[in-house]
Structures are given as structure tokens and as C-alpha cells.
Amino acid sequence: MMLSLVSLVPACATAALAGQDVAGTTFPPPLASYGDNGLTGLLDILIHRIMVQPLNLSATLLFLGAVTHTFFTQRFHHVANMLEERHRQKLRQRGDEGVGDFLPGVIVSGKARLFHFLGEIEAIFGIWVIPLLVMLSMTIGVRETLDYVEKRVNYDEALFVVVIMALSATRPVLRLAEQCLEVFARLGGGRPAAWWLSILTIGPLLGSFITEPAAMTISALLLGRRFYALKPSRRFAYATLGLLFVNISVGGTLTNFAAPPVLMVTAHWGWDTAHMLTHFGWIAVVGIIASNVLCFLVFRKEFAALLPQPAVDAGDEGFKGPIPPWITAIHLLFMAAAVYNVHRPALLVGSFLFFLAFFEVTEDYQDPLQLRSPILVGFFLAGLVIHGGLQQWWIAPVLGGLRELSLMFGAMGLTAVNDNAAITYLATLVPNMTEAMKFAVMAGAVTGGGLTVIANAPNPAGQSILSEHFDEGVSPLGLLMGALPPTAVMTACFLLFPAAG
């Protein structure tokens, strides 16, 4: 059977490139159209679906190429830095520092900028959308390709993340969150360890109410100021990053509206906030506390070496003065409007435009609006959903062929290479799932949400905010190693309480 699969690959690739039997068809085809209900073996089903639609294999190979690309971002940054230094040396030797690679008077290396761009993790899936669209246009046609991109891909989550990141990174919201977390940090004397515990415990749980993207943005910004600015060791830095990503992923399960993977199933499976709190939320709280305590004990000696910053808590208000409560309240109302309109793009964008006007009027109490990171993260997610929508042909049968325990670990593993919201959404397409199976899928999806940057929608936001604290950006391998311990703790928690499902 494996030999037949290997021999099938070149044939399918040839058919896809030649456009045989695929031009003018709907792509991706509905799962029910494959007619493989009589097949029982997973490999048989996948081979059959490739034979029916060879583009399945081509699209998945491009997707895997994008995933692989994410693991080489550090290498691209290294090459870019090397090219920049080489360029500077040439300019110094010539005594002409006003000549660039491409344009006179520009002191830059075009090659170095290109490699920097290829090393931007937020741009990777967008970059790989280009060959995907070219391939689809050459096979199924331009009209069908545009129909898929414009009508069959949902960009609500990507757009929402851009808006909520911009709102939650404003000075009034960030200051309010810091004041709330400061209450808990003061219980530990306001030391770095107290701030670390406060941010990594309360911050993720806030995600169940202000949404995970907002919680990630606020927690990452505060960690950057209160922890990463103190220059922790590389091992400690990655352990904290992995802990943050895992905690945010599970911290949004106390309600049914804040976590992207939960949003995907609530309507299909009828899960309300009470169900989420009693079946997942309390377990998440236990797991977050257990993971934080374990990590704290492992690095307790390193905490002693971290010197707190000068006392600038109150001085954070600076020359602008304190922020009037009514301004903060209006910011929170705009965030609430964004959550309410998450699936209403016109109202979401409209309310954000109103916010921009309000921001200008109250600029005396604002810091410069941060839009670069939100837009890059939105670009990342848009590229991810374009690719992810073409992977259901293999993800759905993989999930459907598993049982509770294997389903949980299967969802966890698939989450690492695809957004966990996509995994839970595809699970809703699997017929006859029991409540225990649904519990296993959700537990696996949220537990594995910290293993990679692409595993959970808010992760790119955290990566974008904190990457400056890591030499040459965040290493995918470093993140994976940092996330494995809290992932193991959360897995144990969900397995220890099977009755919750």
C-alpha cells in the first residue's frame, strides 16, 4: 500500500500541473463528494481522495512547505545579518557609504532586506499563498481561484485580531490591565517573580472575558516590560514564552466566546458558557496554576538574579498625567463592540474607524497607535486560513478514525501544524461524534495550542511583540521545547479528570 502511495505522487503532481480533470471544478470539493464511505482504511481514503482530486496533494505539499519555512526563520535572519555586515564592510572599504545595492544614495543591502523579509514569520503563509494561487489559477482557472479566496475563506478571525490587538495595546487599556495585575503582584512585594506569576496566571484567565488575542497582547506587552527587559537567560526566556502560549490557549475556555477553537464549535455542538466552565474552564485553571508553580520552582534561583527595574510604576503616566476613567471606559466599550461584531466585518471595521477618530481627539492621553504588529498578525492569519481551508481532505478522516485517547493526542499533534480553530471546526464535520470524543478534540486542540506559533491564533501576536527580546527572533525549536512541559501538565490534567467530558 505504501508503495502504491509513493508511485501515486508523481502521477498526481503531473495531473495537477497539466490541469487534467480538474479545470472548472469546485476546489476544494465537499467532503461528501468523494464517495469513499465504503473505504475503511485511512490510507485507502487518502489515496482515493488524491485520485479524485490531485490538487489535494499539491495544496498540502505547499502547506507543508510553509510550515517547514517557519522552522528556518532564524537561519534567514542570520543570513540577512551576515549580508548586511558584508555590505557595510564594502561601503567602508570604498569610502562611499551613500551607495546601496539597488539605488544610489540608499545605505541598505537589498539582498539583506530580502532575507529579513523571508525570515518574518508573520509573512510566511502570505508568501506561500502566491505559489498556491498561481497553481490553482493554472489548473482550475482564475475565476474559480478567486471564488475560493473571496467567498469560501472566512477572514473574520484575522480581521478581528487586527482590531482587538490595536485596541488592547492602547495606553488606557494596558494601564488598566497593569493596575489589575499589580494588585496581585504587590502580594509578592512587586518583585519580578511576583509580576511573572501575576501575568502568567491572571493574564491568560482574562482571555475568557476580553478574548484570547487581547489577553495575549496585554500579557506579552507586560512580560516584555516586567520580565524580558531584565534579560533572563535564554532557557528561562523560552520556558516563559512556551508557558505564556499554552496558558493563553487553555485560559480562554472558561466561556464560549473568547477562544477561537471554542467559537468554531459552540453553534454546532450547543456548548454555552456554563458547559465550558464546568467541563473545561476549571481544569484549565488547575493546569495553569500547576504549570506556573512547576516552572517557578525550576527557575527559582534565576529569579533571584533578576534585578527589578527602577520604580516607575506611578511614573508610567509620565508628563501626560493620569488617564481619566471615562476614556478608559470608552476604550473598553470599543473592545466590547469588537467582540460583539466579530462575525460582522462591516460593523467591526466601522466601529474601529470610530475608535480612530476618538483616539485622535484624546491623543493627549494616548501613546502612538501600534498598527504594524496587528496588521502583520492579520496577514499571517489570512494566509493560514487560505491554506488551512484546503487541508480538510486529510484532517477530517484522520480525526474521524480516532477514539477518545488517540483523538486527544491526534488533535494536539495536528494543532501543532495547523491552527487549532481549524482542527475543531473540521471536527464538527465528522458525523456521530460522542460527547467524550468532542471533549477529547477540544482538550487536545487547546492543550497543543502553544507548541508552535501557528498552533493558536493569538500566538503570532505574542511572537511579534516579544521577538525583539530574542536574538535573531523566536526559534520554533526553542518555543517547542519551552512549551512541552506546560503542555504535558495540561494533558495530565485533562486525563486525570475524564469524568468532566
Image: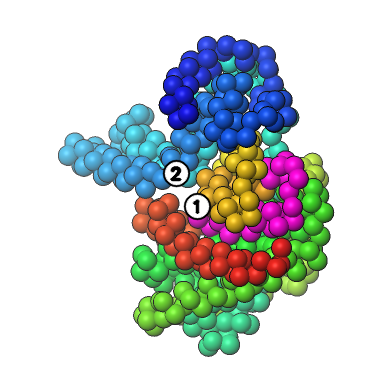
> What is the span of residues highlighted in magenta in the rendered image?
425-451
Tag 1's secondary structure? loop
Residues under numbered marks 1 and 2 in contact, where contact means CB atoms less than 8 Å apart: yes
Residue at image mark 2:
70
Residue 243 picture location, percent across and down? 51, 66
Viewer-nearest residue: 475 or 311: 475
Residue 165 vs 75, above or below: the answer is below
Question: What amino acid is at disc 1?
Answer: Thr
Residue 263 picture location, percent across and down? 73, 52
Q: Which mark is residue 77?
A: none
- For label 2, the crowd category at 10 Å Cα-Cα, with few meaning under 14, some 14 to 19 and many 20 or more, is many
Which of marks 2 and 1 precedes in the sequence?
2
Q: How far apart are marks 1 and 2 (CA)?
A: 9 Å
Residue 174 vs 48, above or below: the answer is below
Viewer-nearest residue: 392 or 8: 8
Residue 382 picture location, percent across and down? 62, 39
